[in-house]
Image (cartoon, rainbow, N blue to C red):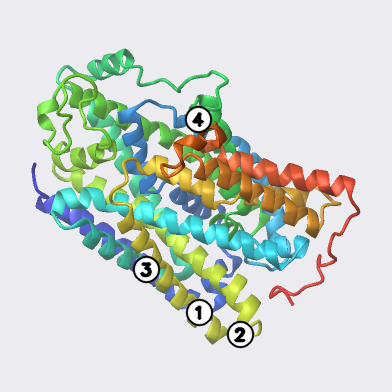
């Protein structure tokens, strides 16, 4: 394995200095709560769109998607194919809905519709989801750096998490958006460069890579059968539609970007810009994973023993090691200088998502908990202190989750499963409020309780500790359907209860202040 040459180190240092410096440049614009959380509502659509794209392309995408394609096929593409429909729904309904009024929290609207419990429920679900997301992102960032530097993965997680927390804390949402835009360009260039170089590195040329991939059905999108047990194309497509509607519809990270845009048209532009770029980039990542499979299938001796499958036949890589292949290739298989670019791209993918999660979590800590329950009339100075402290605390939480993920086999599978669980079906509650005029507090509460019970049943009954004697009571459905069934349970149960009972819709629309008074 070659070590980083001067050119690699130079590329990486230039990137890190540029990103941290750019993020901290916006300190003067982020010294008020409005500037820190909403960029004074002044951002252009193209830069917000790049930020949305950068939020999507975390290190989960950059490393786990190639790992998934290496180990299986292109089934994960079905997730991305749902994005255009989700983007259309977002620009048609979600963007104008959130840009009316002056609320920064995505979940204040739920309080106006159902009461404070709905706001707190959704905010807690978001915070739990971001904790898992930050952990996954930081762990996947540490993998290639561990192979490169030989440092312990926990140490790398703490260093990179601390660096991102620093510029997020100083620069606020405007610093986050601009650094996201820069990082999006870096990661796209790095991914495309690798996708071109890999086939050219095959012993017998690019056609050899295509032949091996075709022979092993690597371009398959998965089964098109009607099964709800296996991760078929349709299961992943439906899962992707619900998760992407949740992202665009109720995720604080995205809603904050709509609010930061300077106009409704710029906000809509940002959604389309971010969503449509992500689809072809997904194909690039899956192409990289497939090319890696072909590359090491004909040259297994290039893999270290720690990754190689000791059993003859089958996959060239040991089970559960698919996520490690791309980081190894970046350090061992790429020319000097390009390795530095790819490591910078992984940093870009991770830091863009991490900074977004940190700012969103800090914003909700202030608006949905501190100002809502502790100090509704908090001064600007007091609010800024809460934002700073919250950013640091959530950075520490994400770091701890990342360390706990070291033993995980497939980060993409774990992220999809945990995102389904912690989302809590809150999309169903939001849709219930939008689609049913009669649904009130009681219908919403019962719907959420039934939805959470559905999620717990589908999740707990498929875990290892579930007694085998009780297998007949276990969920037969694929884990990716957890958020789908949870959402539909809340929506349908709430709607039916609203139809058969008297409406108890609370009168809070436009009657409460942003702090919920």
Q: Which residue is mark 2?
A: 378
Measure how far apart labels 4 and 1 are at the Cα level.
40 Å
Q: Quadrant of residue 295?
A: top left
Specify whether 109 is left or right of 170.
right
Residue 401 shows in this picture: yes
Residue at 65 percent across and 40 percent down: it is: 88
Q: Where residue 48 appears, x then y in whole percent?
A: 52, 55
Mark 2 or mark 1: name the one nearer the start of the chain.
Answer: 2
Q: How dense is the environment of label 1, judged by Cα within 10 Å: few (below 14), some, or many (20 and up)? A: many
Is disc 2 in contact with disc 1, using a CB cutoff of under 8 Å? yes
Question: 334 or 467: which is nearer to us?
Answer: 467
Is disc 2 in contact with disc 3, using a CB cutoff of under 8 Å? no
Residue at 56 percent across and 27 percent down: it is: 228
Residue 269 shows in this picture: no
Question: 453 or 364: which is nearer to us?
Answer: 453
Q: Where residue 105 appears, x then y in whole percent?
A: 62, 65
Q: Nearer the viewer, mark 1 or mark 3?
A: 3
Q: Nearer the viewer, mark 4 or mark 3?
A: 3
Q: Which residue is mark 3?
A: 396
Question: 114 or 472: which is nearer to us?
Answer: 472
Q: Where residue 286 appears, x then y in whole percent?
A: 36, 31
Is disc 4 in contact with disc 2, using a CB cutoff of under 8 Å? no
Mark 2 or mark 3: name the one nearer the start of the chain.
Answer: 2
Residue at 55 percent across and 35 percent down: it is: 475
- Which secondary structure, mark 2? loop
Mark 4 or mark 3: name the one nearer the start of the chain.
Answer: 4
Q: Where residue 254 appears, x then y in whole percent?
A: 56, 55
Q: How dense is the environment of label 2, judged by Cα within 10 Å: few (below 14), some, or many (20 and up)? A: some
Q: Which residue is mark 4?
A: 78
């Amino acid at each position: 394995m070659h070590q980083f040459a001067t050119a690699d180190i130079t590329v990486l240092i230039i990137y890190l200095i540029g990103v941290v410096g750019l993020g901290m440049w916006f300190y003067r614009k982020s010294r008020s709560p409005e500037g820190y959380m909403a960029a004074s509502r002044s951002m252009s659509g193209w830069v917000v769109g790049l930020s949305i794209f950068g939020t999507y392309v975390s290190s989960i995408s950059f490393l786990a998607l190639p790992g998934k394609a290496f180990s299986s096929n292109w089934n994960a593409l079905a997730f991305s194919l749902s994005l255009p429909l989700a983007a259309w729904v977002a620009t048609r309904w979600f963007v104008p809905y959130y840009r009316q009024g002056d609320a920064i929290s995505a979940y204040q609207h739920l309080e106006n519709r159902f009461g404070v419990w709905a706001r707190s429920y959704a905010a807690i679900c978001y915070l739990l989801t971001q904790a898992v997301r930050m952990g996954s992102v930081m762990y996947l960032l540490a993998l290639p750096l561990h192979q490169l530097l030989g440092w312990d993965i926990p140490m790398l997680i703490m260093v990179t998490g601390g660096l991102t927390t620093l510029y997020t804390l100083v620069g606020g949402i405007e610093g986050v958006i601009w650094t996201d835009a820069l990082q999006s360009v870096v990661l796209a260039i790095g991914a495309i460069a690798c996708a071109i170089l890999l086939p050219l590195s095959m012993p017998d040329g690019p056609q050899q890579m295509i032949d091996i991939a075709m022979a092993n059905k690597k371009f398959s999108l998965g089964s098109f059968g009607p099964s709800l047990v296996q991760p078929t194309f349709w299961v992943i497509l439906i899962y992707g539609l619900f998760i992407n509607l949740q992202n665009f519809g109720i995720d604080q990270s995205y809603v904050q970007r709509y609010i930061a845009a300077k106009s409704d048209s710029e906000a809509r532009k940002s959604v389309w810009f971010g969503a449509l770029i992500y689809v072809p980039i997904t194909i690039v990542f899956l192409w990289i994973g497939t090319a890696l499979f072909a590359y090491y299938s004909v040259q297994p001796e290039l893999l270290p023993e720690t990754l190689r499958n000791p059993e003859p036949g089958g996959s060239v890589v040991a089970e559960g090691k698919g996520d490690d292949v791309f980081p190894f290739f970046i350090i061992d298989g790429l020319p000097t200088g390009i390795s530095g670019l790819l490591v910078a791209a992984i940093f870009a993918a991770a830091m863009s998502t991490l900074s977004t999660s940190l700012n969103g979590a800090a914003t909700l800590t202030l608006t949905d908990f501190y100002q809502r329950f502790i100090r509704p009339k908090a001064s600007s100075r007091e609010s800024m202190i809460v934002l700073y402290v919250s950013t640091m605390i959530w950075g520490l939480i994400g770091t701890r989750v990342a360390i706990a993920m070291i033993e995980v086999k497939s980060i993409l599978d774990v992220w999809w499963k945990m995102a389904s669980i912690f989302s809590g079906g809150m999309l169903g509650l939001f849709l219930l409020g939008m689609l049913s005029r009669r649904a009130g507090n009681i219908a919403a509460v019962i719907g959420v309780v039934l939805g959470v019970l559905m999620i717990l049943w589908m999740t707990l009954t498929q875990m290892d500790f579930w007694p085998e004697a009780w297998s007949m009571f276990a969920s037969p459905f694929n884990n990716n359907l957890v958020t789908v069934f949870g959402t539909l349970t809340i929506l349908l149960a709430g709607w039916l209860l609203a139809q058969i009972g008297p409406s108890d819709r609370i009168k809070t629309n436009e009657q409460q202040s942003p702090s919920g008074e």
